[in-house]
Image (spheres, rainbow, N blue to C red):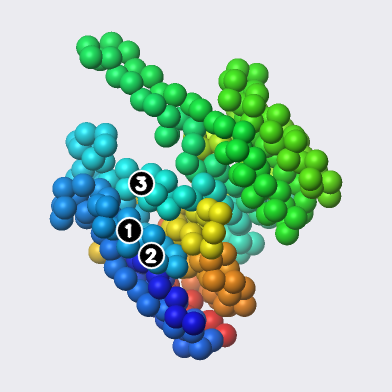
Amino acid sequence: MKKHIAVIAGDGIGPDIINEAVQTLEKVASLYGHEFEFEYLLAGGASIDEYGVPLTDETLERARSADSVLLGAVGGPKWDKMEGKLRPEKALLGLRSGLGLFCNLRPALMYKALEDASPLKSSIIGDGIDIMIVRELTGGIYFGEKTLASDSSWASDLMKYSVEEIDRIARKAFDAAMKRRRKVTSVDKANVLETSRLWRKVVTEVAKDYPEVELNHMYVDNAAMQLVRNPMQFDVIVTENMFGDILSDEASMITGSIGMLSSASLGSGRRGMYEPIHGSAPDIAGKDIANPIATILSAASMLRYSFDMDAEAEAIENAVEDVINAGWRTFDIARDGEGHIGTKEMGEKIREMMK
């Protein structure tokens, strides 16, 4: 069956890394007899330049009509002076909200061959880092009512969560834990925030439906500390939007490089939006330097979560690990003084390893 994929390259290194991911999906199609149809759309800074807004209604509708969305990265200094609602990053919020994508899965996985790239001591890393962060994506302070006084003397951002919003993201986390090591850490700030007290209450109730899964609660400041003190204690972390944004970036860096980690944004249906967690890095755009692995792994997640193509996803993931084990490195994960390869060559190496 033909799968219709909306491709949003975005800004900066977005086109560089998206190109490698699309070619990898084409390799999957040839190996497994699938057919992927790619529709290229604009969002972020590229959309501002073309249409004057970061996300047009037409682009959102085209994304809704696709089976899934593959995204590169958006933003850059060129648009930093744009007013809030016109900033490139608003495209991400608009897509997530417009597509009903309330769950963000961000794996933080450290490859054994890249252990020396982690800023943590080997005694802390142990046998490796393998954490799944489940971040609520369409609620909380990012989407709450925002107010700026007419004289700019004060401002406020409303953090709001409903029982339904917390319940559905908690179930995504427990479902993920059932396929992993069956442990969920719910992160909040229940000693201070009323929304966090509701969060803790609802997650505790959901846990009753998953007796096989161990649940513990942790304040967000302690979680940030524990990620660098003892990351091995975590299996699945579930938390609200802003906390998840911060903790997932922290988790990515302790694995060695933000250029290695993918993300999947999911809703109640099969359609998802898949993107690397890193930014657009406009300073290296077009220089054949960017690491395409996070975007290629995001394409693998698309195959798994939206298309039920587990074997095809594993073929990509295994090829990435084989390339890393073989010693091939892009600039961001190369040791000092060690040779490295470019964006295109890394993509080619991964496709050569696919079986």
Pick the residue in front: 232 or 175.
175
As measured in the structure, the alpha-carbon distance from the residue carrying label 2 to the one carrying label 3 is 15 Å
The residue that label 2 is drawn on is: 65
Question: Quadrant of the rendered structure where residue 14 is?
Answer: bottom left
Residue mark closest to the camera, 2 vs 3 = 2
Q: Is residue 96 above or below residue 190?
A: below
The residue that label 3 is drawn on is: 94
Residue at 28% across, 14% down = 149
As measured in the structure, the alpha-carbon distance from the residue carrying label 1 to the one carrying label 3 is 11 Å
Badge 3 element: helix
- Name the amino acid type tagged 2: Ser
- Name the amino acid type tagged 3: Gly
The residue that label 1 is drawn on is: 61
User: Are the residues at dot 1 and dot 3 in contact (C-beta closer than 8 Å)?
Assistant: no
In this image, 297 relative to 341: left or right?
right
Q: Position of residue 90 (x, y in %)?
A: 32, 43
User: Are the residues at dot 2 and dot 1 in contact (C-beta closer than 8 Å)?
Assistant: yes
Pick the residue in front: 29 or 350.
29
Circle 2 crowding by C-alpha within 10 Å: few under 14, some 14–19, many from 20: some
In this image, 130 relative to 88: left or right?
right
Residue at 71% across, 29% down = 201
Badge 2 element: helix
Q: Position of residue 161 (x, y in %)?
A: 54, 31
